[in-house]
Amino acid sequence: MSQIQEGGDGNKKPVKKTPNDFMFGKVIGEGSYSTVYLAKEVETGTEFAIKVLEKRHIMREKKSQYVMREKEVLMKMNHPFIIRLYFTFQDTDRLYFVLNYAERGELLDYLHKLSSFDVPCSQWYAAEIVHALEYMHSLNFIHRDLKPENILLNTDMHILITDFGSAKILNKEEEIKPEEEHHTQRRKNSFVGTAQYVSPEVLTSKQVCSSSDLWALGCIIYQLLSGLPPFRGGHEFQIFQKIQKLEYEFPDGFDPLARDLVEKLLVIEPTQRLGCEELGGMEQLKSHPFFEGIDWEHLSEQKPPELLPYLPATKDNPDELWSRPGFDDKRIVELITNNVSDNLSITEDERNKRLEDQKKNNEYHKFVENNLILKQGLVDKRKGLFARRRMLLLTEGPHLYYVDPSNKVLKGQIPWSEDLRPEAKNFKTFFIHTPNRTYYLEDKKLGSQDWVQKVDEVWKTYYGDKKTKDGSKNG
């Protein structure tokens, strides 16, 4: 963990790095006892991610063993899909870990943006995780906190597994004792990590093994395709109960090969999970039909597929319903739907009159902050393969509120900006694209183009003139 440089006497001497060798920039990540900064090495201009750990906090929280273990694990690993530790150094108050800079951020951010991935993307990233786990387990390391948040993406969109603070080194001399598990310190009523991905043997205080990472892999594959982790609940204890009972369901449209793989990974008994040593090891996992076509030997050299959302045909929304040779769904909708839009320009008196009527007669007025509702209707707001019924309210301002119509609770807003863009996929489905997320919405009354036209009309009212004056895209 040091550089070699020519000394004045002609001998090679190791030179320790110090904080002065780097220019520290923005914060790109924060943990329970660390902060990660984007930094540039002064001498070479190379960008790194530097994890800075406060010594006082580590000592106070009794995290020294985890910090030292993370350093030990990272120093021994060299794999294209695992974060690399280049240097470590310290000063009076802090420890510094100099790591790869993952330019594309967290895999979780892309899941939030797209809601879910299509089958080729899910297959690819699951394969990269398997490739990294096979290497990691061959060195007798287990991660124990594998989740989309701890999977970063480099500039070429390959994964970099990070955050080995919870890792364990398995060997004959060191037995993992249940009371040492920091995942479920129930006596302290605390939980370090993410509840949705923890394996049942951790919850029942049994010995942890490499198969615990296979459980997390099953949860991740489920989430990549469906948009949500398999075990969900209002609080952690409820999630733990579901994990121990293996209580989860596959949503309509879930890929059948992926389902078979997930069912072989989410098994209560660790020795019965596909990929564990008792069932033939990782080669058996890699041979599963879900991974057909994966070139395991050259995975890191190939270009990952473009990230696309998973919108399979279902019995309620068959993709092929309006398909025609030579036309995509959006174009067919535009051709068939009447393209007339209402004029938003009304007098102040007319607006006030409509607003008074809205206050008296529209039960959803209380959710829109006294803004005039321009269009409203029930839609299914999708997150991957899951959907929730919402009342969508387009108002002046502009705003796009969505309300739970059963419980009459405001659930949130779709954020407006100059970059917001509506798009009709077919007669039912339309998208609202924002810089950080694409919202997938379904109108059961086949009114997707009506929504797109009205949102686009409101967008032009508030942003159209500015865009034209700026010389950028004309709304």
Image (cartoon, helix red, strand yellow):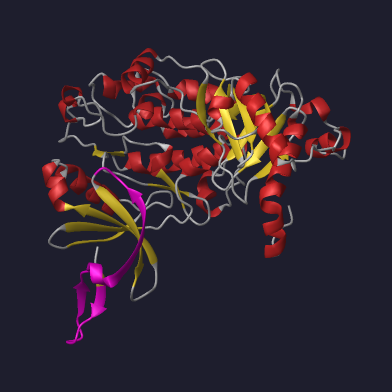
- The x, y position of residue 176, in whole percent, is 19, 30
The structure residue drawn at horizontal position 15% and vertical position 36%, both measured from the top left corner, is 173
Q: Is residue 220 magenta?
A: no
- The x, y position of residue 334, in whole percent, is 83, 38
> In this rendering, is residue 369 above or below 247?
below
Indicate the quadrant where residue 358 lies: top right
Q: Quadrant of the N terminus?
A: bottom left
Q: Nearer the viewer, residue 280 or 343?
A: 343
> In this rendering, is residue 68 above or below 324?
below
Residue 245 showing in the rendered view: yes
Residue 118 showing in the rendered view: no
Q: Is residue 324 left or right of residue 366?
A: right
Q: Nearer the viewer, residue 34 or 73?
A: 34
Q: Residue furthest top?
A: 245
Q: Is residue 8 magenta?
A: yes
The structure residue drawn at horizontal position 20% and vertical position 43%, both measured from the top left corner, is 66
- The x, y position of residue 327, in whole percent, is 85, 39
What's drawn in magenta, residue-wise? 4-32
Q: Nearer the viewer, residue 133 or 148?
A: 148
Indicate the quadrant where residue 95 lies: bottom left
- The x, y position of residue 264, in whole percent, is 47, 22
Indicate the quadrant where residue 186 lies: top left
The structure residue drawn at horizontal position 32% and vertical position 51%, both measured from the top left corner, is 77
> In this rendering, is residue 106 above or below 119?
below
Q: Is residue 391 left or right of residue 146?
A: right
